[in-house]
Image: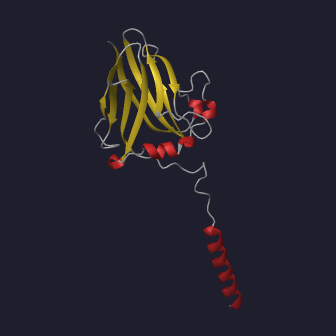
């Protein structure tokens, strides 16, 4: 009976010791608890002009479709893009994504009927793109098309193509926090 108590005590101490060991909270292999994104605001600024496009889905995964405000850009104009993101309850989570820049990237998909050039203007601590800020130049004539914007958590940024690092492809992997599309017109 005395040995049984010693054995039970040994098991209890072992369980407490091994149970207290846990993985580092910053381990990049941990499961990502996806934030509920309820609003994305994309601002195109050129001098005094600002064109604002919004995507808003206040009921999250509910039955109501998102409300999308598309935009019209001027031809042959350089715009600075600035994106802000809100989570549940309208809480601005843009700073949180910026602080976790090594674990995120915003990707852009667009046809040649929208932009002549695209350039990221922000980066993570390793010099890789983040994408909450960028610079584009619209085509010199009338055009338009769909602008797809994706926020990806833990992409393999080394898989970005050097000539088009803003284009998402399946080899990049990661988990999409949002994938939205705007209809953009280029006209005077």
Residue at the limit of the structure toward the front, as seen here: 47
Percent position (x, y) of residue 56?
32, 37
Residue at the limit of the structure toward the bottom, as seen here: 2
Q: Residue at x 55, y 28 (%)?
A: 169
Residue 88 showing in the rendered view: yes
User: What colour scheme was applied to this rendering of the protein?
Assistant: secondary structure
From the viewer's perspective, tell me whether residue 82 is left or right of residue 13. left
Q: Residue at x 52, y 48 (%)?
A: 32
Percent position (x, y) of residue 137?
45, 18
From the viewer's perspective, tell me whether residue 26 is left or right of residue 116. right
From the viewer's perspective, tell me whether residue 111 is left or right of residue 74. right
Where does the N terminus fall, quadrant-wise? bottom right
Residue 126, quarter of picture: top right
Where does the C terminus fall, quadrant-wise? top left
From the viewer's perspective, tell me whether residue 126 is left or right of residue 111. right
Judging depth in this view, the residue of 86 and 188 nearest the camera is 188
Q: Residue at x 37, y 36 (%)?
A: 40
Q: Residue at x 71, y 87 (%)?
A: 3
Percent position (x, y) of residue 117?
50, 18
Location of residue 34 with respect to 4 vertically, above or below: above
Judging depth in this view, the residue of 78 and 157 nearest the camera is 78
Percent position (x, y) of residue 134?
48, 28
Residue at the limit of the structure toward the right, as seen here: 3
Residue 178, quarter of picture: top left
Residue 110 showing in the rendered view: no
């Amino acid at each position: 009976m005395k040995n049984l108590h010693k054995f039970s005590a040994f098991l209890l101490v072992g369980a407490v010791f091994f149970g207290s060991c846990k993985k580092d909270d910053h381990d990049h292999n941990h499961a990502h608890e996806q934030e509920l994104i309820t609003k994305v605001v994309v601002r195109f600024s050129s001098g005094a002009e600002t064109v604002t496009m919004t995507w808003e889905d206040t009921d999250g995964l509910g039955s109501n479709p998102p409300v999308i405000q598309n935009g019209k850009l001027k031809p042959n104009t350089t715009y600075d893009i600035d994106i802000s993101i809100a989570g549940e309850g309208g809480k601005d989570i843009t700073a949180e994504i910026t602080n976790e820049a090594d674990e995120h990237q915003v990707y852009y998909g667009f046809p040649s009927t929208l932009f002549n050039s695209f350039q990221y203007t922000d980066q993570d601590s390793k010099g890789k793109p983040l994408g909450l800020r960028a610079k584009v130049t619209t085509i010199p004539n009338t055009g338009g098309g769909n602008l797809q914007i994706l926020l990806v958590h833990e992409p393999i940024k080394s898989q970005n193509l050097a000539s088009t690092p803003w284009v998402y492809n399946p080899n990049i992997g990661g988990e999409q926090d949002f994938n939205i599309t705007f209809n953009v017109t280029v006209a005077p």
